[in-house]
Image (cartoon, rainbow, N blue to C red):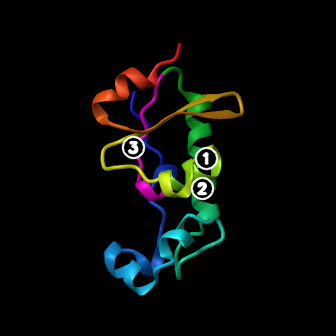
Amino acid sequence: RRFVSTDFSERHLGALDGKSKELLISADPELSRKLITLEYTPSGGESGRSALERFVRGIHTIKNNHQGRVIVVSHGGIVALFAHHMLGVRQTSCLLEHGHALIIKVSGAEISLIGMNVPPNSIAEATYYG
């Protein structure tokens, strides 16, 4: 069964959208650090807090409406916010490689980290825990 939700959309970065990461970092070397905070809001964009709340809402919607294993396809920036602030992954380790997975288990109100940066060929083995 397919479920589509805008709760997993990329964080809206306002004036930063569409610009290369290299250009943005050269203009503001602290940008990567700022983007992982909840307080920072790029001009015309979405705060880290708002993006994280939206992502967590999506996780809870899935938990409340779907049984068994679920794959969520999302964007690296919002996944990094979730991994850092909800799962305690260090800021320097919370970015995913392209095509890699963050694997979580949701049980009641508890969200647990199962795997971080899991390569595509290892996802099937890492996702099912009874």
Residue type beneath disc 3: Val
Q: Dot 2, how many residues are within 10 Å of its Cα: few (below 14), some (14-19), or many (20+)?
A: many
Identity, as a three-letter code, of the amino acid under mark 2: Leu
Q: CA distance from mark 1 to mark 2?
A: 6 Å
Q: Gap in Å between the C-alphas at discs 3 and 1?
A: 14 Å
Residue 129 image offset from top left, x and y in percent? 52, 17
Q: Which residue is mark 3?
A: 73
Compare marks 2 and 3 and give the one earlier in the sequence: 2
Pinpoint residue 74: horizontal percent, then vertical percent.
Answer: 41, 48
Residue bearing mark 1: 56
Q: Earlier in the sequence, mark 3 or mark 1?
A: 1
Residue found at the very far right of the displayed protein: 109
Q: Nearer the viewer, residue 21 or 45?
A: 21
Main SS, magenta region, reads: loop
In the image, which residues are magenta? 69-78
Residue 6 visible somewhere in the drawing: no
Residue positioned 39% across, 74% down in the render: 17
Q: Is residue 64 above or below residue 51?
A: above
Q: Which residue sits furthest top?
A: 130
**Does the magenta segment cover residue 88?**
no
**Which image quadrant is residue 4 in?**
top left
The front one of 42 and 5 is 42
Q: Residue at x 53, y 82 (%)?
A: 43
Residue at the outermost bottom position: 27
Residue placed at 70% from the left, 28% from the top?
108
Q: Residue tagged by mark 2?
A: 52
Callout 2: SS? helix
